Image: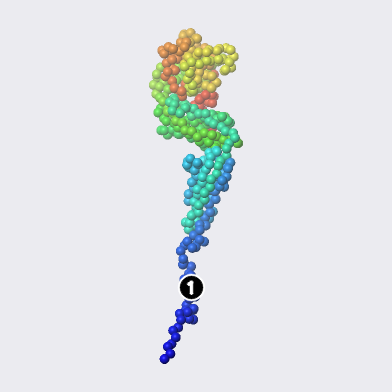
Amino acid sequence: MRRRRARRAGGPLALLLAPMLLVSACGGDDAGPPAHRPADTASQAAVEIAPRDGARDVATSGALAVTARKGKLRSVTVTDAKGNAVDGQISGDGARWQPSTHLGASTRYTVDAVAVDARGRQAAEHATFTTLVPKNTFIGTYSPENGQEVGVGMPVSIRFSRGITDPRAVEKAVTVTARPAVPLAAHWFGNDRLDFRPEKYWAPGTKVTLRLALDGVEGRPGVYGTQSKQVSFTIGRSQVSTVDARAKQMTVVRDGKRLKTVPITAGAPGTETYNGTMVISEKHPVTRMNGDTVGFGGEYDIKDVPHAMRLSASGTFIHGNYWSGRDTFGTRNASHGCVGLYDRRGGGDPDTPAAWFYRNSLIGDVVIVKNSHDRTIQPDNGFSDWNLSWAQWRAR
């Protein structure tokens, strides 16, 4: 009997089913893992960093910016080589980040920025750049010194080594704060001096901090600051001394109470003492006073003036006087514009009025002169800032 031959699996039916299975395995929009679909996972956002990666000689102001296209910035981090962060702010629409301050000169910066598109997918960029090396620089010399205790009339005063033509840029880089807090305002004298003070004298015990962030500030075209510094000083007790040139007396008031009244001699007719509010800016146990240096020719040259305290840049001092007779003090004005107190030659007697006043005075103490037949001292002559009203001070 003949056996029926078995049908092979590779017959026509199998050939028809194979393409159907293949279509079933590969068809459909949602099949396959996301990693196999790069066009669907790539962020539509793009981050742009200016300046470009690797740039050199970058300007310290106005050059750095990070922007996002087809998305919003999520984070921007800018640091220098020491890891110090640069403050900045992302705009409200998320399209742009800019630094809040200038950059330092001769500094390498690193930028890392992340943006997201409408579906929350991230795009990131990284760049480094180096700021310019300035050929011309300026610094600010400040008063008072770090850690110093000063009187209630002491302003914060900064004198710049070059004239400033962009005062706003420089002023933005200088901050003065007080604890306890008190409103402060800045005032420019010319283009090379910037002072800060409160409306009234400082309160005793106030701690004042000056921060100079001038590194990289373009104070004038092509001239850049080099300082990053912080200094603090403390206000001591309140002492205000009033010189009455007519009465030839000085009354010393400390913390609101009269401490002592001492006889003085002020400027003689023709060389009167300035009226107005002055501040002690220097103290010298002994100094030389030569008329040639202040326009009086050879009228005097005293090599050992004791207990000398400067009141003006133009040469007004309150100092010990041993060369006028003791009966001069309190009776007549005989000086070339200074305020004189009785003293002994060499200043070695601690009981003289000059020695007592020197011992009891701080740099920053206030000395007010009234009833003199001269004009009021100019506010930029020494630390005579208080001769401007608060409105005048703030008007600059």
Q: Quadrant of the N terminus?
A: bottom left
The total of numbered circles placed on residues is 1
Of 292 and 121, the residue lying toward us: 121
> Of residues 244 and 348, which is closer to you in this image?
348
Q: Horizontal and vertical percent for residue 206?
A: 41, 30
Which residue appears at 43% of the width and 87% of the height? Answer: 4
How packed is label 1: few (under 14 Cα within 10 Å), some, or many (20 or more)?
A: few
Residue kind at label 1, given as amino acid type: Leu
Specify the farthest residue to the bottom: 1
Residue at left offset 43%, top offset 33%: 178
Q: Residue at the spot x=56%, y=41% of the render?
A: 131
Q: Is residue 76 above or below residue 338?
A: below
Mark 1 residue element:
helix
Q: Which residue is mark 1?
A: 22
Q: Inspect this view and state whether residue 255 appears.
A: yes
Q: Check the image and report above or below for 267 versus 4.
A: above
Q: Position of residue 14 (x, y in %)?
A: 47, 79
- The residue drawn where x is 41% and y is 33% is 180
| Residue 288 drawn at (x, y percent) | 52, 15
Can residue 246 be spotted in the picture? no
